[in-house]
Each structure stands twice: as C-alpha cells, then as structure tokens.
Image (tube, coloured by chain):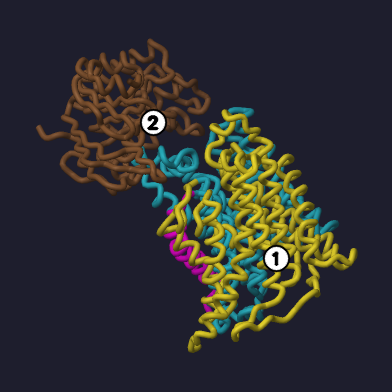
Amino acid sequence: MNVVTPAMLGQVIVSGILAGSLYAMVALGLGLIFGVMRVINIAHGPLLMLGAYTTFFLTTHAGMNPFLTVPVSMAALFVVGVVLQRGLVFRVVDAPELSSLLLTFGISIALVNLAQLTFTSDLRAVEYITGSWVLGGLAFSKPRVIAFAFAVGVTALSFLLLKTTRLGKAIRATSQSREVAMVCGVDVGRIHMLTFGFASALAAAGGALLAVIVAIQPEMGGVWTFKSFLVIVLGGAGNYPGALLGGLLLGLVEQVASLFLTTQLSEVVAYVLLVLVLLVRPSGLLGGRQT
Amino acid sequence: MPPVLVVEGVRKSFGGVAAVNDVSLALEPGRIYGLIGPNGSGKTTLFNCITGIERMDAGRVTFAGQRIDGLKPWQIARRGIGRTFQIIRVFPELTALENLLVVTRGAHGEAERRGRELLDFVRLGPLAGEYAGNLSYGQQKLVEFVRMLMTDPTLILLDEPAAGVNRTLLNDLLDAVSRLRDAGKTVLLVEHDMKVVMGLCETVFVLDHGEKIAEGPPGAIQADERVIEAYFGR
Amino acid sequence: MKRALAVVALLLLAALAAYPVFGTGYGVRSIQQIFMWVALAGSWNLISGLTGYVSFGHVAFFGAGAYTGAILVASAGWPWPVAALAGGAASMVLAVVIGYPCLRLKGPYFAIAMLGLNEVLRALVSYFEGLTGGGNGLSLPTLDAAVPIYYVMGVLALAVTAMSWLIVTSRFGLRLMTIREDEVAAEAMGIDTFHHKLGAFLLSAVGPGVAGALTARDQGYIEPISVFPLAVTVTMIVMALFGGKGTVFGPVLGAVVLFIAQEIVWARYPYVHPLLFGALIVMVVLLMPRGVLGLLQQRYRLPRTI
C-alpha cells in the first residue's frame, strides 16, 4: 500500500476534476433523455463512440484540427439522434420501461457492430497534443485540460439553453410533467425529438474530446453508458445540475481509488459505488425524482 | 372499544411542498368514514402513508394496537389493511380470477372457490377467465374491489370508489360497503361525490392543503365555514 | 389434441435421445448447442420475462459456472458432472450476492446494475489471476466427452423448461407476473415482491451456471473473454424475446429457430451477427413485443401456460 503524500492527493484531485468534467457533460445528455422521456438510453455510449470516429475521420482525412471538429461531431450526432428518436425510440416512450430498455439495448448492439464492420476493430488514435503542463508540482495533462475547457463550455452553454431559451424551458417543463407541458401548448413530440438529438450531441462532444486522449475502438462506449448512469444516480434522476456534481464526484472517486487499487479494480469500485448509492439513497445523493 | 386505526402527526413533503401536514385521526371499528377535500389536499398521499407506499417524514400510525409506520406495504397489507386505488390497478395480463387468486396464500381449491364466489357477488362470474386488461372500466373497478376483499381485511381504504362508475354499479358497490360495515369491518373512503359521502359516511374528515380542517358528522361538515371556504373560496 | 401433442413430444425426445448413435459429430455439437440455448434463454425468461426485471448481465452466471467447473476439474480433479452441478450452485450463490442489493432497486435501476456486472466480473477474473489463470485462460485435462455432455445438456434443457412450466402454472408464477404488471399494487395486496424477485433470480441463475461448467468441460479451455461475452447475453435475450418472453415454450422456440438461422448466417456472413441480432431485438420490441408465441396466444386464444 502506498503512502499518500499531499502532492499525490493534489494530483488526484486535479485528475479527478479533469476527468469528471467529461463524465458530467456526457451524463447530462443521458439525464435529459431520462428526464424528458423516461427512456433509459443504453445506446448512449455507442453514440459517444460515433462522435469519436467522426472526429477521427475529419482529422485524418480532412486535416481538421481535432478540437474544431467538436461542433461538427455534435451536429452530426444530433442528426443521428433525431433520426433514431423519430424512427424508433418514440414508439416506446409510453410503453413499459422494459421495452425502451430492450429497444435501446438492441440499437446499441447494432451500432457497435456497424462500427466494427465499417471501421474495423483496429485501434485508432488522433495525435494532436500530448504531455502535461506542470504547475505547482502538479501535472495537468494537456489534452485533458483542453477537453476540460470544452466540456465546461459546452455544459455551460447547455445550461444556458435550458434556463433561458424557450426550447430549454419547454424541455424542462416536459421533464417535470408531460401532461402539464402539453396543456401549456408544448409540442411534446418535437421536444422528445430535439432532446434526444441534443443528448446525442453531448455524447458526441464527449467522444470527440476523448479522441485525442484515448484509443478509439467500436466498443469504447459501453463503459461510458454505465458510468453515465452512475453519474445520474449520484446526482439524482431529473436533477440536471446534480449531474455536474455527480460527474465530478465520480471522477474524484475513481482517481482516489486508483491510488490504492489497480486500474482493473477501479471499474469494480464504480460498480460498488453505484449499488451502494442506489441502496442507501435511491433518489440520488443530491435528491431527484424516482422512476 | 379501542380504535382500529390511529394516525398521529403524519407529515409528508415532496420537494419542499407539504402534501400532508401534521394530520391526526382515529377510526373506531365497524364504522364508515369519509375523507374529503379539494383536489391536491393530500388525501391519496395520506392513504399512501398509511399503507406504507410512501415513507412518512414524521408521524405514527397504529393499527389494531400495533405500530405499522415503517413497515413495508406488503407487511401492512397482510396485517389486514386493504385498499383500492384512484387509478385502477388491476393486473391486466392476468385473468379476473387470477387477479383474485394471486393475493391469497391458502389452499388453491379453497381460494378458487372463494374467488369465484366474490366474482359472482359482483356479477362478473362469466368473465372469470377473461384477461383483466380486456374488461371495461367499471368491470375492472369491480375486480379491484373484490380483489381487495380476498385478503379479508379488517380496515378498508377506498380511493374514489365512485369515480367513473354508473349509478347502478355505484349502488351495488355502496350496498356492498354497507354490508362490510355491518360485518364489523371499518371503511375509510376518499370521495368527491358528496351524495355518496353524505349518504354513507358516519363521520367525515376534511383535508385542505394537507391539513385536517374539520371532522364530524356529514351534516355538520356541510355547514362548516372552513369547509365551504376550502372548496369555494371566500 | 393434448394427447396428440404429448405423443409428438415423446417421439421427439426419443429421437433426440437416440441421435448420437447414428448422427454426425457436427450434428451432435449443434443439437447440444441448441440444448444449451434452450436452457439459457429459458432461464433468462424466468427473471426477465416473468417479473419484467431485465437482466442484462445474465452471462455473469454462465461465466461464473464455467470458471467454477473448470477450476474444480483442473485443479481439484473433480469429475465433470459433479463440477457442473457445483457450477450451478456457485451461480446461485452469486445470484444471492448480487440479487440481495440489486433487486431492491426499481426495475430500470436493476437493469443498469446488471449492465455493469459483466465488466466487473471480467475485471475480477483478471485480478484473481492465480486462481483463474487470468488473461491466459484455464486449460482442462483433455477429454472427449461430447456425447455424455450432449445428454447432460439435454437433461438441463428439459429441466429448465419443466421448471418454467411448473412456475408459470403455479400461484408463485402468477405473483411473479404481478411484479411485472404493477409492482406497487402487488405490494399493496400483500405480496413480498423482494423475496419473490430474489427467488426467481436464484432459479434463473442455475441453468446458466451448469451450462457454463459443461461448456468449459466441452471446450477444454476457457478465458475471460470466452465466457463473459456480451454476445451470450444478447443471444439469450433475442431468443427469449423472439420466441415469446413470459411463456414457457417461447424461449425453446426462439432457441431452435434462431440457432438454426444463426448457423446459416454464420456460414455466409460471420461478421454481421450482432448487427442482425440487435436489429432483430429492435424489430421484435416494436412489432412483436410478445414474441411469436405471444402473438399466437392472442390470435388463437391459447392458454397462457404454453
């Protein structure tokens, strides 16, 4: 067992916050789908994966700066999300939750396999920026810092959209009560479609930013689906700001755990955390709506 | 005789809004009670707190002399509290008879006999093998009602039994409720239909914004200023 | 009608029992696989089809059974049939360990928890390398037991189907279904939903556990990726869904039809497998949510207990 120095702790906090920002942004998307449509989108991870591939291809084939591809990836996956919702998901919004679980599960399997067929399972990487800035004895991984900046920016814009625009208010209203929103003249079907697109865009942003940090392969999204759920559970279902804190919390917990356990077990930690939180406070650490 | 149900200081809030705020009441055995109040006054939430479906923030519930707050819903149900729901909750993919059988624990033959008897009692005998989901609204309501009776409860909580039900069916239901009271059971019903409440209930509790604002015989309640205010405003 | 069906069933069973005597090696393997999928899909149906609590991590029991069986045979020299039973027992224990916390969660949260289970178990297998051989896998002493395993797997398939039938025709089964229909109402009617779910979960873990151990013996070598693959879960699910979840013979039908379809597709297009299955799940959920048997039940007013 290592001896923990303040420097290590500091590093852990830094790494945790950097990682947590991505968790928060991606999880916000998942949370929106769940809050607005009561659908558990198991295909969320694969959508992130598609965002990563979009960035990869734009960077290697069109020579774009990887960070500039973020909005493009987001736009592309927004469209994909809208198509998925309008084509498939909308049919199970009112069905038992079992149906939407199975449906999005089927979609996720199909998407991953499509990716395997189209892109092969070869690991891809986007080489753009590596190394770390060192500040006060702590290392700040460069790509992660830039990703952090983007994530914060995208998330902030998302909240601005939710709070101030008519669309955002309609989304929040539908999230609280579909019936009341309908009575107030909200086109709920359109909101569902746009929310799913928006959430897919958030996942794509995560993927695009990750493209510079980790290896890209078709199955990379699966663990992100699970961790996004964990963030939602931590923050409370339907509690959108809660997702932010949940994301940061997950990032920190993982980094702290990596001090004492091997990386293999850090996923186990996430899992145990999920189960514990669900048992002790089913409405999330910060309170939210139950299913 | 000791009261069959004692509710003391029950409080339940949802996100800062108090749905039930310090409500207390006591039910004597063998009587029919009414629980009325404008929409959103906390009646169903109170039911949910009593039956354990919602966890109370504060308060005590005593049934037949024993504390039941904190118990799981199935434990409370097994002690002898039966309820129906505001929105019908039959099991749609089970047949009418299966809906009744599924709540019993005893010998299968005996349970089936009793189930058919109850279905005949509400004139649904021929539909025993029909999937509950295929029945009409009124028929489902009856199935839910007799399903609750299968457990032979001591205390019966009815949540808007008259809602959406035609006059003949309603009379049959109310008749059944009277007979249950005569058999020694205690009934507490939530209702909006004032004729039902005034005609059937011996004592009425009135809730408004989660608080009990009045309690007494129907005649007194009708004339109570606070009650009138709650329903119609000043 | 019933008499005729019974006769056909008995003839079929007799034919299956006699097959290894005059059939090909490929045929024996294939039918054995079908038996395995009948057992897996049927087991998945017990928890997910009846109670509506979707288990996305059911392959965990398969893998746990495989490792238990393999370790007992390779390191402790147990005879493989006993090791197979031990695999089933180990899976039951795992089901209690996982089910106890996770089944207290509401349906969708339970599904999420089960989703992560695969990854966790794979990580644990790597971690406990000494015992499990880690990423290098575990080898068993060579043994050609293809025919005995065929029979044992057949008995397993029969046992799981029989258990399904017993459950669906009992009040226990009805109570499980009320959990799927309306858990709140079920609780309000005095049904202890938690223990019912746990019971179904336990029962649903035995089949995969035994099947996993048998597969380990049959293949002579296992490694984490081979016994905890998502594909096993997906296949279990699509078979039960297609055939008719919540019915007794739906998973059997799904296993047979989809295995045969899979073999045909596999020969020509080996890589589109998951895509096809994923698309099939989507189609079944949208167009035929009760599966083939469920559709027939509705159309021809068949009893629920088929």
Screen quadrant of the C terminus of chain B: top left
Query: For the stretch drawn in magenta, what is the main secondary structure?
Result: helix
Going 84% across and 57% down the picture, which residue do you hit? C269
Q: Inspect the image, locate mark 2, and give the three-letter code of the amino acid beneath it.
A: Gly
Give the colour chain B carries in the figure: brown
Mark 2 and mark 1 in contact? Answer it, CB < 8 Å.
no
For mark 2, name the chain.
B
For mark 1, name the chain.
A
Going 36% across and 47% down the picture, which residue do you hit? C192
| The label number, if any, that marks residue A220 in the structure image | 1
Q: Is residue B41 above or below residue A116?
A: above
Going 84% across and 60% down the picture, which residue do you hit? A118
Q: Inspect the image, locate mark 1, and give the three-letter code of the amino acid beneath it.
A: Met
Give the colour chain A carries in the figure: yellow
Screen quadrant of the N terminus of chain B: top left
Mark 2 or 1: the one toward you: 2
Magenta range is C77-106
For disc 2, the marked residue is B40
Q: At numbered mark 2, what does the secondary structure look like: helix, strand or loop?
A: loop
Taking depth in this image into account, of B45 and C2 the one nearest to the observer is: B45
Going 55% across and 52% down the picture, which residue do you hit? A240
Specify whether A19 is left or right of B3. Answer: right
Q: Is residue C87 magenta?
A: yes
Q: At numbered mark 1, what does the secondary structure look like: helix, strand or loop?
A: helix
Name the residue at the left extreme. Answer: B1
| The label number, if any, that marks residue C300 in the structure image | none
Q: Is residue B166 above or below residue A188?
A: above
Chain letter of the cyan region: C
Name the residue at the top extreme. Answer: B168
Instruction: From the top left corner, tell me how far across and down residue C267 is, in percent.
Output: 83, 58
Residue B81, quarter of the rendered image: top left
